[in-house]
Amino acid sequence: MSRSPNRTIVLWCPDWPVTAAVRVADCPAGPPAAVVERGRVVALSPAAHAAGVLAGLRVREAQARCPELVVVPADQRRDARAFEPVLRAVEAVAPGVQVLRPGTCAVPARGASSYLGGEAAAAAVLLDVVEGLGIEGVRVGIADGPFSAEHAARTAPAVPGTRVVPVGGDRAFLADLPVEVLAPVLEPDAPDLLRRMGLRTAGAFAALELTDVLARFGADGGRAHRLARGEDQRAAAGRAPLPELGRTVDLDPPLDRAEQVVATLGPTAEDFVAGLTGQVLVCTGLRVEIEDDRDGLVVRRWLHPRFFTAADVLDRVQWQLAAGGLTGPVARVDLVPEDVEPQGAHAEGLWGGAPHEQVHQALTRVQSRLGHRAVGTTVIGGGRGPADRMTFVPWGDRPVPARPGEPPWPGQLPPPLPATVLPRPGPAGVLGPGGSPAVLSDRGVLSVPPVRFRVDDDARPVAGWPVGWQPVQAWAGPWPVDERWWTDDAPGQLARFQVVGVDGSAWLLLVGGGRWWVEASYD
Amino acid sequence: MTALPPDLAERLAAARSAVAAVDSRFGSTTPRRPLETVPGLAPLLPGGALHTGAVYSVLGSVALATALLAGPSAAGEWCGVVGVPGFGAEAAAGMGVDLARTVLVPDPGTDPVGIVDALVGALTVVLVGLPRRVAPGEASRLTARLRQRGAALVVHAPHGAHGASAWPQTEAQLTVTGSEWRGLGEGHGHLTGRIAAVAVQGRRAGRAQHTRMWLPDAEGRVRPALEPAAPQTSTPSTTPLTRVAG
């Protein structure tokens, strides 16, 4: 029946961090337990679930609901170590295991189901094998790609613990899931934004035009859109490995400690990602081979929900080292991309004018070092404040201003425009004659003419800016500001002033609610 | 073309191969190339223009540093702005900077020089804001890279942060020594432009050269100030030079 090349089985162990903690005896098995990361609950034991504790709660709230709760700090290396026996057991019955993260793995359905007598039988065998290790509550999902298969597993009923999405049924299956399932692929604030746009389900997102999605959310949006349409291009089987894009590090002398190995590998991981970005590719499936100096070898294949950054690669190496299996110090590490995808909006070929190839390579290289959002260009749109009008567009995303440039915005500042626009206005001070405070009245006029001002009314003034009070040489204003303020505590009426100091510096200041800010410098 | 005598041809070939060997060992250097430079500044710079393979430093004024990018950018070169948070892109566009080919890296992290190194060559002119002094070794490595790849660097250092010594050896150092803002009065008008007194100190020149330019004018452009000078001063940057027309 299966004509889908990426048909995938995903095995998911719910609350794996707690199961792992119990299995390596960091935590007793009986009482309610929770694993905590950065002060919040991330995983719960069944007893803690029963006591009403929820994932995402603060530790103190969780303990209020369940005073006998055992709290264990998160440790991904422990999770990886405890998952290793599960992976071995799954590998024994189904070839080609890929790890999504400790607690979740994928196998290509084609091999397993022909070997085990059909998809339902394969699912039953996998559940049986893992429960045989004493792990409760395991779920299996089967679908046309790893993304849908994982969500099939996560939504599978406790009995029989399996959900099979029929061939060709991924999009229909995903349509009813909340839009948050796309969160791992999108920017952190995107799901929230989608919800405010009235798009509550993955199906509603999938129904958008691809060009609109790319315009608003860039390459990440394009990838999420593809997933939501049930067109996951990642292959659990892995495709032909691309050894020429892989990287090998020989460690001489061999290194004993995982931290040393990871530290030594840092530049290689960056180079690995940069090599791919140079080809306008991202890696979604990675094979890591670690060899010790006694011919011991551990090989793991990792699948990423988005794509591997250099830090992600190092995480996988660290997890793989924590899982054990080597008898001596590490002598060699191989990173082999097994599955790659074209990267970024440039690859979508929707807007012409392909940039200079050399420029693209250099910029993606810097992005692989500093992050996608660290490098970009600016487009000018509408708005009155100087910061409102500039939109920073990360390299690879489509340049669209946040506010339309047309029609004209009344009340916008006339040129010339400031040379430096603070991303966030900083505190400033303005005084009238005799040191009386200059405040803006309800009618939008200043109580006293400004006589002295300072732009460094802060613990950390901008480098090179004048320090302390200086006399006002000339000033003008107010220009009322009626656009939305940048914080929640709106100080009521706001206005802009231009001020020139006796030192020859010129400034754009803001006043409102009895306080002054510096918004921009003209120098 | 006349044929060379055999022994001369041989020596010429030997010399060429020696040059090629040096090039392959140390990286070839591209010839210095003049870049488009905004009128008003060009005559003051060594060689009459901004050149590839050179480092220029600008003290204090972001507008002046941006003006150096405007010429090459308007002529179609890719430019970069590294470590200048709050770079006023719209003002830059007014000076002639083509924003579509100007790449911003507002926060280059702990190694801004390393980021610049990764960008030069792909980008022809990079403006970098440096929060600290650059070590001489680091500076000469990057300068060699600029020569290899045919790029220019503009180093912007805030006034007073580390003074004139942000970069050990620059082709020229540019400073705004005074500003006359126009258009603003006692509570009325609005800024319409500035005439800046600019000093350019070349590496080999003994004395700094001075000029006056609109930085920017009422349309946001940079151009030489042709009007008769206001009472001029020859004092250094600490003395204000302000006069308000209003």
Image: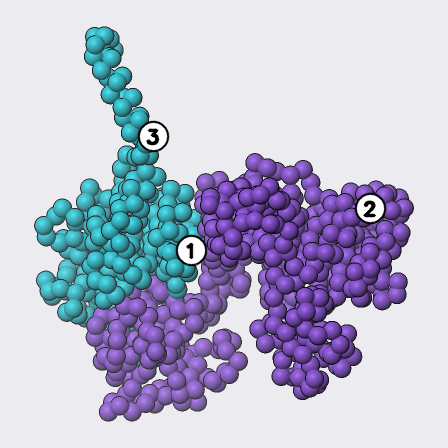
Chain colours: A purple, B cyan
Q: Chain of mark 1?
A: B
Is A332 on the left-hand or right-hand side of B142?
right
Question: Which of the marked residues, 1 or 3, is nearer the chain's N terminus?
Answer: 3
In the displayed structure, would residue B99 be above or below residue B148? below
Measured from the top left, where is residue A427 in percent x and y?
Answer: 37, 79
Which of label 3 and label 2 is nearer to you?
Answer: 2
Measured from the top left, where is residue B89 in percent x and y?
Answer: 40, 59
Is A1 on the left-hand or right-hand side of B105?
right
Q: Chain of mark 3?
A: B
Look at the image and tell me in which quarter the N terminus of chain B lies: top left
Please give the residue where the numbered disc 1 appears in the rendered image. Answer: B104
Residue A126, located in which quarter of the rendered image?
A: bottom right
Q: Which mark is residue A112?
A: 2
Q: CA distance from mark 1 to mark 2?
A: 50 Å
Measured from the top left, where is residue A182 in percent x and y?
Answer: 68, 61
Q: Residue at x 61, y 38 (%)?
A: A242
Q: Residue at x 56, y 41 (%)?
A: A246
Q: Residues within 10 Å of mark 2 (few under 14, many from 20)?
A: many
Is B116 on the left-hand or right-hand side of B193?
right
Measured from the top left, where is residue B147 in percent x and y?
Answer: 29, 40
